[in-house]
Image (tube, rainbow, N blue to C red):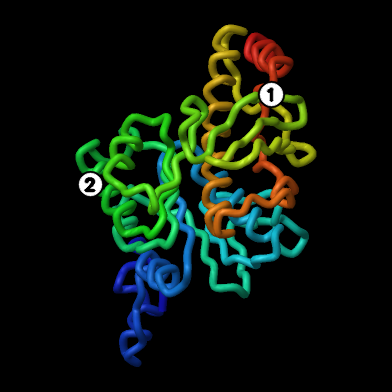
Amino acid sequence: MVTSTAVEATIPDVQAAQAIGARLDDPRELLAELFNARPTVSVSPAPAANPPSTGMIGWILYATGRDPIVMNGAVMKNFVSAATPFASALVGKSGIFVSEVDESDGSIARYAPHVAVLNNISLDHKTMEELRALFADFLTKAKISVVNADDAETAALAAKIAPPNKISYSLRDESADLYASAITPAPDGIAFTVRAKGGADVRLHLQVPAGTTSPTHSPRSPRLGRSMCRWRRRRRRWSNLAASGGGWKRRHGTWRHGDRRFRAQPGQDRCHPQYAARLSRAASS
């Protein structure tokens, strides 16, 4: 029987399960147990858009025929159907398990991933000292760590990892293992060029699923609107590169053009310049 911390021992169902000697599991422990039993890609809970990173890695693997298991903390637009309107999970038949994991309750310490993806570290839920210790342990236990070289905290942890066990990605540093340039926002998504170290440039265009371009934020001025949009675009670029790294290593270093088929997550590009003015008008009305 799986019960969360919100379910008290006095609940009749829990008492009945205990009376017959049934095993009682914490959902966090059960998920970690299932996860650790498979060759896994684990996506860290860093604040910079980890549900989209989880969804994109899951979609890359699914679209290239790898049939992964995916556990996410948000609905994944690409997997939504009439039968699964709340597609926050995907039950695949392969041994690959992609999961968003959580540092807020410390359960990240239960995971021993094959591939760990860390977008950034910032003050949230715990002190910075606690977060550094949790994420350092998370990366150390992974066989391969995909890390954001543009974030100072993440880069400091990554510096302690030997290169064969590390894939860095960057929007600034051309020496990173994955480097993105020529970033071009568009009304229907975002395009950029990715170069793997020692490889050729690959141009990607990530599309936003239909019906997800309506604004949901309300900046109070055009200038603030543009600033918010620039930040959200940078977060998405980190996520896109992180997803590329997680899927790229899973394919043993081979970049496949078929990966261009995956689409961005819901609402991932509301920040084209033409939308900034629209958001500002909505705020002033």
Disc marking residue 184: 1
Disc marking residue 247: none
- State the image quarter where residue 15 is shown: bottom left
Callout 2: SS: helix
Amino acid at circle 1: Thr
Q: From the viewer's perspective, tell me whether residue 226 is left or right of residue 101.
A: right
Q: Along the line of sight, which residue is nearer the eye, 271 or 22? A: 271
Q: Of marks 2 and 1, which one's residue comes earlier in the chain?
A: 2
Q: Are there few (<14), some (14-19), or many (20+) residues within 10 Å of tag 1?
A: few
Q: From the viewer's perspective, tell me whether residue 31 is left or right of residue 181.
A: left
Residue at mark 2 to residue at mark 1: CA–CA distance: 37 Å
> With respect to residue 54, does 179 lie above or below?
above
Residue 71 placement (x, y as % from top left): 53, 60
Residue 256 placement (x, y as % from top left): 68, 52
Q: Along the line of sight, which residue is nearer the eye, 271 or 82? A: 271
Going by the picture, which residue comes out furthest to the left?
A: 129
- Quadrant where the C terminus lies? top right
Q: Say which residue appears at 60% left-offset and 65% top-offset.
A: 68
Going by the picture, which residue comes out furthest to the bottom?
A: 20
Amino acid at circle 2: Ala
Name the residue that disc number 2 marks.
133
Residue 267 placement (x, y as % from top left): 66, 35
